[in-house]
Image (cartoon, rainbow, N blue to C red):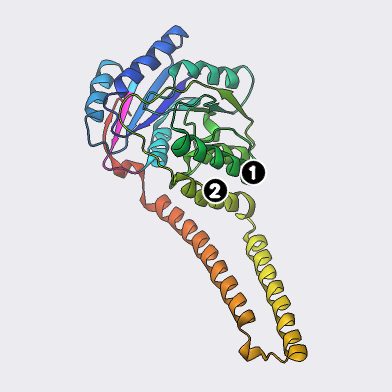
Amino acid sequence: MKYSIIIPCLNEERSVKILAEGIIKVFKKEKINDYEVIFVDDGSTDNTFKNLSGISKRSPKIKSIKLKQNQGQTFAISTGVKFAKGDIIILMDSDLQNDPEDIPKLIYKIEKEGFDVVSGWRFRRKDAFFTRIMPSKTANFIISIISGVKLKDYGCTLKAYRKEYIKNIKLYGEMHRFIPIYAKMEGARITEVKVNHHPRKYGKSKYGLFRIFKVILDLLVVKFIKSYYSKPIYFFGGTGLLVIGLGFILSILVLIQKFFYRIWAHKNPLMTLAVMLFIIGFQFILFGVLAEIEIRTYFEVRKDPHLLIEKKINIR
């Protein structure tokens, strides 16, 4: 069985060499030789790819891809997955906060216990509480409730997948954290294991406090696709019936006010205001979903990863 470790990186010139050496050491200790490590440089402006080039030239196990410009972590992961040859695909961060020593735990859960997806849980995170940990816990709670896939740490990049559950997933925006949800939709067995988490030594975090709002918006799209993609009339029709029902109730109230309190309908803004707000809100949701579908079509047709790759080393 072959293993592919995919690592997106952005301006991590001081970390990539240490990480590559750590991964090689772990696989050597486990006496596993059939593996590859794919670094995807997401448009770094420092010496990240230069350092990766040196590592890749010394070891054929280390493969490097440089994107022409920054496309985001999700696209970098998706690009790595497209070139991966492994039967088990492992994702991890490049900032040294994920520990290569945890990789065998993930592999064991898949190979020995039969799981399809293994998610890392940073149960002792070494991040700032108010700007990183608290928003993350909030997001994890919301995602688990809405998606029905209960994980304690969606934000942990360190995860392992059987190839068949990740190869065909189309990822856009910042939806890499939702891969377990997509996998579950395909019938994957998912588990979670405690993993180490180290303080950041070099560089700075690419995420801020307001990431939670992006998470919520992406989650709404995932929920729609999961529940209504093949039957959108249930969503739009149900919402339409609800709006009509509310409008009917408000109309009855306006009639009561007219006949019993002599408040004429043309002087009563209640019904007009309610209908206007509901129509505007519904249109915003509708336009958002339609725009999401359109942008997915655009990316599918136009954004071929091969067109955005500047260089490849040890990649065929």
Residue 313, horizontal then vertical, whole percent: 27, 27
Residue 145 is labelled as: 1
Disc 2 designates what residue?
219
Query: Is residue 173 magenta-colored?
Result: no
Examine the rendering and report whether any part of residue 168 can be seen.
no
Which residue is situated farthest in the right direction here?
A: 260
Left or right of 305? Residue 52 is left
Q: Is residue 119 above or below residue 71?
A: above
Q: Mark 1 falls on what kind of element?
A: helix
Q: Is residue 146 above or below residue 154?
A: below
Marks 2 and 1 sit apart, C-alpha to C-alpha, by: 11 Å
Q: Is residue 237 above or below residue 22?
A: below
Please identify the quarter of the rendering in which residue 73 is found. Answer: top left
Residue 221, horizontal then vertical, whole percent: 54, 52
Left or right of 258? Residue 125 is left
Q: Residue at point 43% right, 56% down?
A: 295
Residue nearest the observer in this picture, 238 or 297: 238
Instruction: Classify the position of the C terminus by image quarter.
Output: top left
Tell me the amino acid under the disc marked 2.
Leu
Residue 229, horizontal then vertical, whole percent: 60, 54
Range shown magenta? 63-71
Q: Residue at point 49% right, 36% down?
A: 167
Work out whether mark 2 precedes mark 1 in sequence or the reverse, and give the earlier one.
1
Residue 293 is labelled as: none
Examine the rendering and report whether any part of residue 166 can be seen.
yes
Query: Is residue 67 magenta-colored?
Result: yes
Please identify the quarter of the rendering in which residue 74 is found. Answer: top left
Q: Residue at point 63% right, 86% down?
A: 268
